[in-house]
Amino acid sequence: MKFRYLPMTEQDREEMLKVIGVEKMDDLFADIPEKIRFKGELKLEEALDETSLVKEMSRLANKNIHIKEYPSFLGAGVYEHYIPSVVNHMLLRSEFYTAYTPYQPEISQGELQAIFEFQTMVCELTGMDIANSSMYDGPTALAEAAMMSAGHTKKKTILVSKTVHPEAREVLKTSAKGQNLTVVEVDEQNGVTDLEQLSTLYNDDVASVIVQYPNFFGNIEDLAAVEKIVHQGKALFIVSANPLSLGILQPPGRFGADVVVGDIQPFGIPTQLGGPHCGYFAVTKKLMRKVPGRLVGQTTDDKGKRGFVLTLQAREQHIRREKATSNICSNQALNALAASIALSALGKRGVKEIALQNIRKAHYAKEQLRKHNIEIVYDSPQFNEFVIRLPKAVRDVNKELLTHNIIGGYDLSRYYPEKEQLMLVAVTELRSKEEIDQFAAVLGGVK
Amino acid sequence: MKIHDQPLIFEISKQGRIGYSLPELDVPETDVSDLLPDAFIRDEEPELPEVSELQIVRHYTALSRRNHGVDSGFYPLGSCTMKYNPKINEDVARYPGFAHLHPYQEEATIQGALELMFKLQQSLEEITGMDQVTLQPAAGAHGEWTGLMLIRAFHEANGDHHRTKVIVPDSAHGTNPASATVAGFEAVTVRSNEKGLVDLDHLREVVGGDTAALMLTNPNTLGLFEEQIVEMANIVHEAGGKLYYDGANSNAILGITRPGDMGFDVVHLNLHKTFTTPHGGGGPGSGPVGVKKDLIPYLPKPVVVKDGDAYRFDYDIPESIGRVKPYYGNFGINVRAYTYIRTMGPAGLKKVSEYAVLNANYMFRRLAPYYDAPYMRHCKHEFVLSGKRQKKLGVRTLDIAKRLLDFGYHPPTIYFPLNVEECLMIEPTETESKETLDEFIEAMIQIAKEAEENPEIVQEAPHQTVIDRLDETTAARKPILRYSKEVQ
């Protein structure tokens, strides 16, 4: 069988073997001991021609129900938003997606400049001084922030609110184990961090305090009050923020956050079953040399022309080896590019407008649900998510919603067993009034 | 006045321009101050660009033209496997049934995605000879750390708390020791011998009761197969340690030999190297991890299992190391890798490795007369040259790399591995034609001649790029990491 990705002809092969000075292909593998040579053929499905491949991959894709078919009220850390067409078109410029990390700046100025612009946009959104070129996703960025805080403060305890995304806390705990750090969870009180307990738990061994903004239940944490507690001592204040909410919410930088992390997925990145998304990582100036991952900086060439390079690499694993404090190499550069393009398209005005539509539509949804006698559980200020109480288990309600071609919200009992019958609902700019009305009506009818 | 021949997006911004289209708000336009307390309302807008759609297109098109990808030209970057990224993979990953799935949808609504993940797990198990694969890790480094955490959990479950050391060859990539540190181990270096392979005597010296694992890339970073891998596995296993396979170089071994059969206990693969998913200018990648039976109990949650005709996530892994990534890994990347595996099938994958190795040996043989070849024997998918001879003429390997830019090539990996002086590490991959290889070889020969006859042309390279060599020292001493009106 011939393969379209393999250009060598038989004649090429013979000529090349001759130059090398061997008779057959197999001679090139003579250094692999016979005992561990793989005999026969791998038990994999046979190769598919392109037409059959499309058919098979379409079969798999069509077995799924996707959120462009059915209106969805799922959020919980992953959000479906408007993505301007221009984003995908620019991403498909293959000079971007088929390139490696820009280690050769002379032929990577495009990527380097795009990342420099990304870093700037993240700083603007979060109100921070410095942002890196991206991390794998929000939760691993959060875990890296915690590891960085321990390295910076030489302290061993991380305080994290239970209102932080449960999967982020799980990733944090796995990472902390590697570094022998202790993670202590702070309870919630009425859907926000219990500040009294935070005060009690705070001590000299605390490296950082982590809260989420808006938190996992959609409630907006009182960052000013948290900051006062955190900065009693040397601990760092880490805030995980939904970047879209920052179109309307006061950014964490203004509340004295030392580190702001999160996932930039709401800008230009499809949900894709949860990955790849794109973590962002922003800090104050004093932490510049502690930041994990790659940083792009501006400089000049010998003619004085502006250019961009990867910089402050002395922090990174390929230089520091076992002394490195993070092992991250590849990040999510292409998704950072997607976010930059989306943020350019939306711009100053669009980011605010989308944020406003989200908060207004969520507010409208709450009003409609109340009209149908559905309880809105928390009375804190909220952005585009909130929690409702249902008369029966969320998974059963979601099954019922699915029969109306609606994908319901997130079942909070998945991670909070005591929150039986509580659903976390996300309402974005993509949900029309009609869809919200129907959602409320169906839920109102649930017995 | 500074010369800015490519403006930043912020520099073409003009108040009042937009590049988006949102529907009119169809719900009441509630006043924000009725929804949020004043303290939470942003009082200073983020300075994001205000540009039209065509301006965006021109801007990013211009940036793309200042970037070199595999589609632009040959990219023989050693250890990075810069092979062709098939277009069909990009199409498939964008099918709405893959791109627009929410991770918290009911399992019944994502059966196709689960089937794909399950089959990809199975395929990678077969390719690596391992018993179970997790698709969660986001990248190679993330896979390394995950694998080491699994090994740590295994030793701890056996009460082996004194196994604190991870052995890494001196030729290893810096990520290996960094991952060991981040997983809470101490990295110990084992020397290479004069053949470029792990020095077995030294390995015996450093292995002991405190050994948690040996991390190895095979073929190693010199492109050489560690022929004594079976003996090495015995040495480590007899001491109670585990063997970790860094799959960065697995493009050389598909269908030819398997880490599981070599004696490895844990493997990670870089799907963005061997399995054609694009590097993206530095990610997103995907770094699945495979393990042998005795490590399965510690795998991160969840794994995909098949019950009858249905697929589901299994969270019931009581001894799991926990979660290493939210949701289920980089699904969109895994879709591309699976598409590739289905494109090639078992016979095709074996051909991939054969041609990757043929191409590398051909180039090695033809270039060896012009540069120093510290390890002259059959290589696998890549090989190293040394620019020692050129250095004596005043031409450094960095200069050679920069001169290659003038010929339209991305240079090889340079100054790595660290145990080769003035190193050039070349990996052609199997997707390049003989003509491309020959042209590159001719360019390398010409540069070797220039080093003798006209070294300035090499030392002052590049001559053809949009920008000259950049001042990296100032960039690091006085970092400018974001745009601001004042600085520009």
Image (spheres, rainbow, N blue to C red):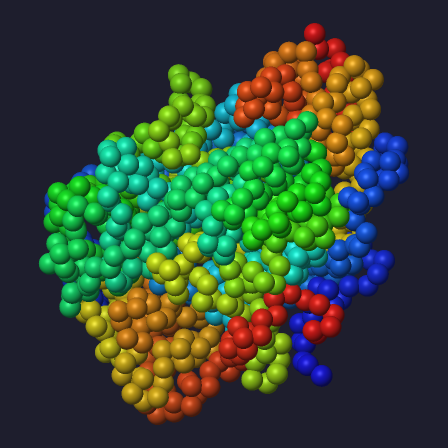
Query: Where is residue B323 drawn, in percent x and y?
Result: 45, 36
- Give left or right: position of A308 versus A16: right
> Could you tell me which quadrant the C terminus of chain B lies in?
bottom right
- Give left or right: position of B402 versus A427: left
How many discs appear? 0
Picture quadrant where residue B159 is located: top left
Furthest toward the bottom, the residue is B453
Q: What residue appears at the point 21 percent right and 72 percent down from the top-left corner?
A: B374
Query: Where is residue A83 drawn, in percent x and y?
Result: 69, 44
Q: What residue appears at the point 88 percent right and 32 percent down from the top-left corner?
A: B28
> Could you tell me which quadrant the N terminus of chain B lies in?
bottom right
Image height check: is A285 above or below A49?
below
- Give left or right: position of B480 versus A323: right
Residue in the foreground of this view, choosing between B59 and B134: B134
Picture quadrant where residue B199 is located: bottom left
- Give left or right: position of A416 versus A12: right
Q: Is residue A21 visible?
A: no
Q: What residue appears at the point 68 percent right and 15 percent down from the top-left corner?
A: A390
Residue in the foreground of this view, choosing between A319 and A63: A319
Query: Where is residue A223 drawn, in percent x and y?
Result: 69, 44
Furthest toward the top, the residue is A447
Picture quadrant where residue A18 is located: bottom left
Residue in the foreground of this view, choosing between A384 and A210: A210
Q: What residue appears at the point 28 percent right and 75 percent down from the top-left corner?
A: B421
Q: Is residue B482 visible?
A: yes
Query: Where is residue A333 drawn, in percent x and y?
Result: 54, 55
